[in-house]
Image: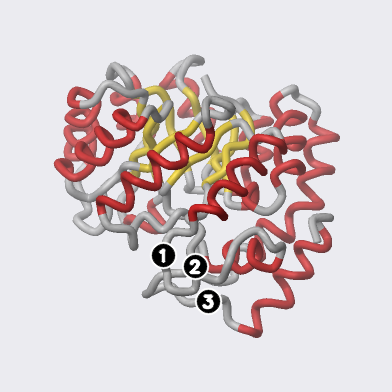
Amino acid sequence: MLRGSIVALITPMDPNGDVDDQALARLVDLHVEAGTAAIVAVGTTGESATLDEDEHCRVIARTVELAAGRIPVIGGTGANSTTEAIRLTRCAAAAGADAALLVTPYYNKPTQAGLIAHHRAIAEAVDIPQILYNVPGRTACDMTPETTAELARVDRIIGLKDATGDLSRIERLRDLCGPDFAIYSGDDGTGCELMLRGGDGVISVTTNVAPREMAAMCRAALSGDRAEATAINARLAPLHRALFVESNPIPVKWALCELGLCGDGIRLPLTWLAPEHQPPVREALRLAGVL
């Protein structure tokens, strides 16, 4: 089981919107050196919605190649079409990814029975460990703890990224799914507390810009050191908030550009961070000690 600070990595792009391979290599090396537990390639933060299928597969494969076994790579392979999700998950498996992260189908609002059938079909089709991803704020579809428990019994489904920010779910999920099912926070603001309550880590936007600090916070939380974990998290809290002043990944891409780690490329319909939001993000970077 992967545990700790898992980065939801951006897909760096040049000003024309083309994937920047050199910046991707720098970012992978940064996370290896900083002690990040794993990389999610081409998740929401990686602009999965704006990459076409070929690009999606290439970025996952290139991230695996650059990681070179030094850090696990989880391919973001979810889609609102089951057949497309199977194709993307096969790409991740063929590339040598360690696991796949599959968001609940968005826009078409499936029933709970539909969610079970969707994820069961992918698990039966592709031999790779799979992590469910529940983010109803983006998908308009909420996977219930009971549905999660049903899927936890399916071979190859090993965990859940829960981005509801609802800490009351953690005990219910743990009771229903058992101790061997991984539960990750997908919400940086509540990730520390989720781990202190028995979760296994956080799949994080903040880790893009504060990897060492997030790794230290997760180590403390997972060891049960509440005082140390909450102290580190308090320094990171302004950053957790500032990185969502506009839709993710707009602020985090601006922050990484400000830190000199990538260029200013982003794809429409996403736009560059508005000038009025840049000072608070810069101040949050300073407060976190990374600028």
Lower position in the chain sequence, tag 2 or tag 3: 2
Give the x, y percent position of residue 47.
41, 58
Gap between marks 2 and 1 measured at Cα: 5 Å
Residue 199 left/right relative to 98: right
Give the crowd class for mark 1: few <14, some 14-19, many >=20 residues within 10 Å. Answer: some
Residue 18: mark in rendering: 1
Query: In this rendering, is residue 12 above or below 214?
Result: below
Residue drawn at the location 58% of the way across and 67% of the way down: 263
Secondary structure under the numbered disc 2 in the rendered image: loop
In the depicted view, which residue is nearer to us: 81 or 72? 72
Residue drawn at the location 57% of the way across and 55% of the way down: 23
> Which residue position holds label 3?
272
Callout 2 touching callout 1 (CB < 8 Å): yes
Secondary structure under the numbered disc 3 in the rendered image: loop
The number of numbered badges drawn on the structure is 3
Q: In which quadrant of the rendered view does residue 77 lie?
A: top left
Depth check, mark 2 against mark 3: the one in front is: 2
Structure colour scheme: secondary structure
In the depicted view, which residue is nearer to us: 129 or 202? 129
Tag 1: residue type?
A: Asp
Give the x, y percent position of residue 174.
49, 23
Secondary structure under the numbered disc 1 in the rendered image: loop
Give the x, y percent position of residue 238.
74, 60
